[in-house]
Image (tube, grey):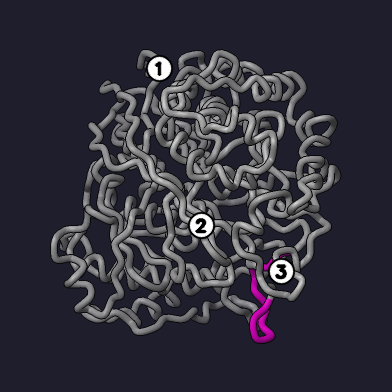
Amino acid sequence: MTTMRRFWTAAGLMVLMTSVAQAQDAVRPAPEAATGFTEREEVTSETDMVVAAHPLAAEAGARMLREGGSAIDAMIATQLVLGLVEPQSSGIGGGAFLIHRDAASGRMIAYDGRETAPNAVGPDLFLDDSGQPLAFLDAVVGGRSVGTPGTVRLLELTHRLHGKLPWAQLFQPAIELAEDGFPVGERLAALVEGERETMRQDAIRDYFLPGGQPIAAGDTLTNPDYAATLRTIAEDGASSFYEGEIAGDIVAAVQGFEANPGLLEESDLADYRVLVREPVCAPFRAYEVCGMGPPSSGALTVGQILALLDHFDLESLDPLSAQATHFFAEASRLAYADRGLYMADPAFASVPTRGLLDPSYLTARAQLIDRSRAAEAVSAGNPPWREAAQRAPDRSLEIPSTSHVSIVDGEGNAVSLTTTIEAGFGSRLMVRGFLLNNELTDFSFVAEEDGATVANRVEGGKRPRSSMAPTIVLDASGEPVLVVGSPGGARIIPYVARTILGVLLWEMSPQDAVSMPHVTTLGGPLDLEEGRAPAGLADALTAMGHEVREMELNSGIHAIALEGGRLRAGVDPRREGAAVSSGDVSQGD
């Protein structure tokens, strides 16, 4: 097997966003961290594979596979290390969506570990005293934005159902690294430098800004508090996180941040449950593209984009031609219009899941796409099986943080996990060595517009809408052929959809597919990846009526293609991830 070296590359800074009341495309989106683009060699394996956003995390997962663990065991070890070495993106203070495919039974299950809103919150959570939406960072920094974390419960439940190794064994790689230390990479160092002004809590400043100075690339960073927290959970199970001293400290941090306190209570933590759901599967050519349904918009919107594009002969086109890009953009705009109106937590809003993927409905929507001209405006459609309630579109922002893990073990079990604390560094609150999420800012800040309700409004106990799209693609015989997902906020959807097109339609290797120059739209302007778009593409698209922008689009796509017993990895060249198998020696640092 080809091994993967570590790539530490240059990093950039986040842009401060002004207000969630603004439409998404009114704000120039910023990557969580710009790391440039480093070409990657393809990584293959005949046995198993872990692809994750950091070499140490991928190695931790591969270690569990060497020790006889399952894909779920590897996922747990990987996630716990990610919470240490990539703390700004995910961790035990956040939430996750996971798709698991069991090789023996062929059954696929979706696990919803999304954070929930505290029961005490209401629709005015993110409004100021005059009833206007708060500026985004005013809402984020502090306890107000913190939802009930779901990740630890998800890890425990999936281990109980699919794990092979002892629970405590899975914690050892992260505990060892937390105690012995790990080298700070350029990406983390640059992010800390860019966020130093938002780090106002003593605990987070002491860790990331020791002595008032930000940690630097190459520093060795230890986290004994995180190690102690993990030891407690390893010994006493997830209940020790959701009840008792850890839960009390979480609530104290949330409620005690005087500048922006939150409403999370210990009862919210004690009552949290992971939900087991059926995956949402959408047909595409001879395949089934399966992922996370509501409260995520990921599977539905990816499925709609692919179904709309199925009406056009894309395989005959150059993936980076103006015509292929036009079709992709127009399909995305139509899908995002439906997403904004209909998709939310199905326990609180009736989501027409069946109608949104109905072939007749999507055929009618595809007929709205002009082959040579961008539509001046797009609006949501009227899918069958929808309620008659009047709704307003959701304009909430989603920040491009998060992390994705793809795993296939030696028995063929597959895991696609997308995991997050929402924005980089979440709420900027640190407790016992881990960061707390700011997931509640994924809700709409306003509950209604012009008398019509927003499906994704804030409500107690509700799970905010997400764009996370952990995906497993099955062939006509029901066997997995692709495991994929990405971070990237609302742009996760086009990142994942384009990668699927690359592998299934344009017959690219997964590495070439994840390395393709990005094309995204959230329903408005068409965004091309800065410095990587082919010459003349922007001009050709502009001539077709598109409003074109070039910007940094920093994904973190991780994919595994399964081809007759051979695994081929796609590691996003825009970040520092790695693909590792149990046959590799430690990737180390």
Residue at figure coordinates x 25%, y 34% from the top left: 40
- The earlier-in-sequence mark between 2 and 1 is 2
- The earlier-in-sequence mark between 2 and 3 is 2
What type is the residue that disc 2 sits on?
Answer: Leu
Label 2 vs label 1, nearer the camera: 2
Residue contact at pointers 2 and 1, CB within 8 angstroms: no
Q: The C terminus is located in which quarter? A: top left
Residue behind mark 1: 588
Q: Secondary structure at mark 2?
A: loop
Residue at figure coordinates x 22%, y 66% from the top left: 324
Which circle marks residue 16 in the picture?
2
What type is the residue that disc 1 sits on?
Answer: Gly
Q: Is residue 226 left or right of residue 242?
A: left
Q: Would you call the spot at circle 3 few (<14 residues within 10 Å), some (14-19), or many (20 or more)?
A: some
Residue behind mark 3: 127
The residues bearing labels 2 and 1 have C-alpha atoms spaced at a distance of 35 Å
Residue at figure coordinates x 38%, y 33% from the top left: 577
Q: Position of residue 363 (x, y in %)?
A: 38, 76
Q: Would you call the spot at circle 1 few (<14 residues within 10 Å), some (14-19), or many (20 or more)?
A: few
Q: Secondary structure at mark 3?
A: loop
Position above or below: 489 against 249: below
Q: Is residue 154 visible?
A: no
Residue at figure coordinates x 46%, y 37% from the top left: 405
Does the stretch in magenta take in 586? no
Does the stretch in magenta take in 449? yes
- The earlier-in-sequence mark between 1 and 3 is 3
What type is the residue that disc 3 sits on?
Answer: Leu
Q: Which residues are magenta?
A: 448-458
The residues bearing labels 2 and 3 have C-alpha atoms spaced at a distance of 19 Å
Position above or below: 151 against 352: above
